[in-house]
Image (cartoon, rainbow, N blue to C red):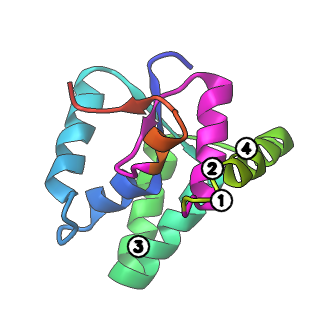
Amino acid sequence: MSGTVLADTGPLYAAVDPSDEHHERAQGEIRRLNSEGLGVAVCYPTLCECYSLVLYKLGAGTAQGWLGEIESNSFLMNPTPDDFREAARLIRGYQDQSLSLFDAVTAAVSRRLGLPVWAYDHHFDIVRVEVWREA
């Protein structure tokens, strides 16, 4: 999966919500991903988390449209049972952090597949996962 980034909820949500503080940044990064031919992978837990945010903050129509875009333009994947075990280990290892299970699973998948995470969340830096950023 070289040439792919693993998306976190932050940029996925920011891209669809014009009132989000990171909206312009997310839109610019999508243009960059497209121009560089980079793919976007999304774990199903992230898809569920972000869909719920879009649904409850922006409404059913926006959420349904967003879901269709993600299905058409992303590689969707299931974490493995080992990814969930690794995520639990990460959470126990960083007890001083409010590391969500969503983020911990994304970090575990990132490590297993060697994919940088497209995220705005500082927790990925704390758990020492490669983060994809604007150059």
Tag 1: Cα neighbours inside 10 Å, few (<14), some, or many (≥20)? some
Badge 4 element: loop
Asked if the residue at tag 1 contacts the one at tag 2, i.e. Cβ–Cβ closer than 8 Å, the answer is yes
Distance of mark 4 from mark 2, alpha carbons? 11 Å
Residue 110 sits in which quadrant?
Answer: top right
Determine the residue positioned at 58% across, 22% down.
114
**In this view, which residue lies farthest toward the top?**
2
Q: Position of residue 10 (x, y in %)?
A: 38, 56
Label 1 sits on residue: 101
Label 2 sits on residue: 104
Q: Earlier in the sequence, mark 4 or mark 3?
A: 3
Residue 36 sits in which quadrant?
Answer: top left
Tag 2: Cα neighbours inside 10 Å, few (<14), some, or many (≥20)? many
Asked if the residue at tag 3 contacts the one at tag 2, i.e. Cβ–Cβ closer than 8 Å, the answer is no
Tag 3: Cα neighbours inside 10 Å, few (<14), some, or many (≥20)? many
Q: Earlier in the sequence, mark 2 or mark 3?
A: 3
Q: Earlier in the sequence, mark 4 or mark 2?
A: 4
Magenta range is 98-122
Foreground label between 4 and 2: 2
